[in-house]
Image: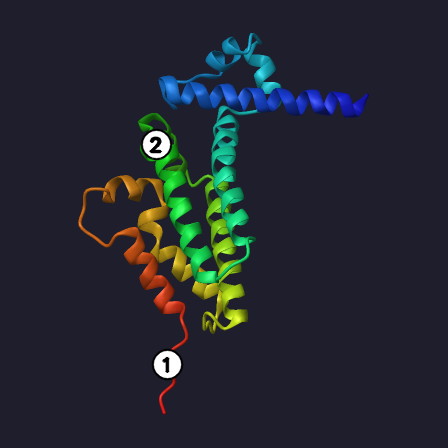
Amino acid sequence: MTLISDHIETDTREKILVVAERLFRQIGYQKTTVADIAKELRMSPANVYRFFDLKKAIHEGVARTLMGEVEVEAQRIASTPGPAAVRLRDMMKTINRMNTERYVGDSKLHEMVEIAMQEDWGVCVAHMEMIARTIGQVIGQGAASGEFEVADLQLASLCACTAMMRFFHPQMIAQCATKPGPTIDEMIDFVIAGLSPRAKAN
């Protein structure tokens, strides 16, 4: 009985998040109310609050889902065979593409991201830490195979993420789209060059 009720509860939470994301895209993040979400699901606002105690918790749940999809794809690339530099490039370009598609091309979802960053939601911090760890995983594999030369793996992964911030952070992707600067491939070339073994002097 508990397993069935747990499944129903999980299913209801997922439905609330799916509807919330759709409404965020349609009418905007700030304009969407719990009553709007409840109406779409044919339930009372009080019932929605049974699953999410605050409206912010729904917003965080939607953000967690969207960011989780990026994390899953980054981890999939990290676990595939092949040279570390190739996987690192693929991962960085994929993160950029997914964040651009999800947020920058959708002004209403972009609004949600802006507020999330301003309020420093824990889900955003956790996402950035996960991306840094996944990038660090590939850099570590490259160091182990001799493809990269890294003295401090944690520092190397943080530096790589910071270098790519213009291409990772939704707000910066939007703000820098028309500004002069390196292309994403040029920036990745720079990062990989910094990780590559130095030529030893005779």
Q: Quadrant of residue 52?
A: top right
In this rendering, the label closer to the viewer, 2 or 1: 1
In this view, 88 is above or below 13: below
**What residue type is disc 1 on?**
Ala
Q: Nearer the viewer, residue 197 or 18?
A: 197
Task: Tell me which residue sits at (36%, 62%) in the image.
Answer: 191
In this view, 154 is above or below 61: below
In this view, 77 is above or below 112: below
In whole angstroms, how far apart are the C-alphas of marks 2 and 1? 44 Å
The spot of residue 127 in percent (x, y) is 49, 45
In the rendering, which numbered label is found on residue 199? 1
The spot of residue 69 in percent (x, y) is 50, 38
Question: Quick one: SS at disc 2?
Answer: helix
The spot of residue 5 in percent (x, y) is 74, 21
Q: Quadrant of the N terminus?
A: top right
Question: Quick one: SS at disc 1?
Answer: loop
Task: Tell me which residue sits at (37%, 29%) in the image.
Answer: 109
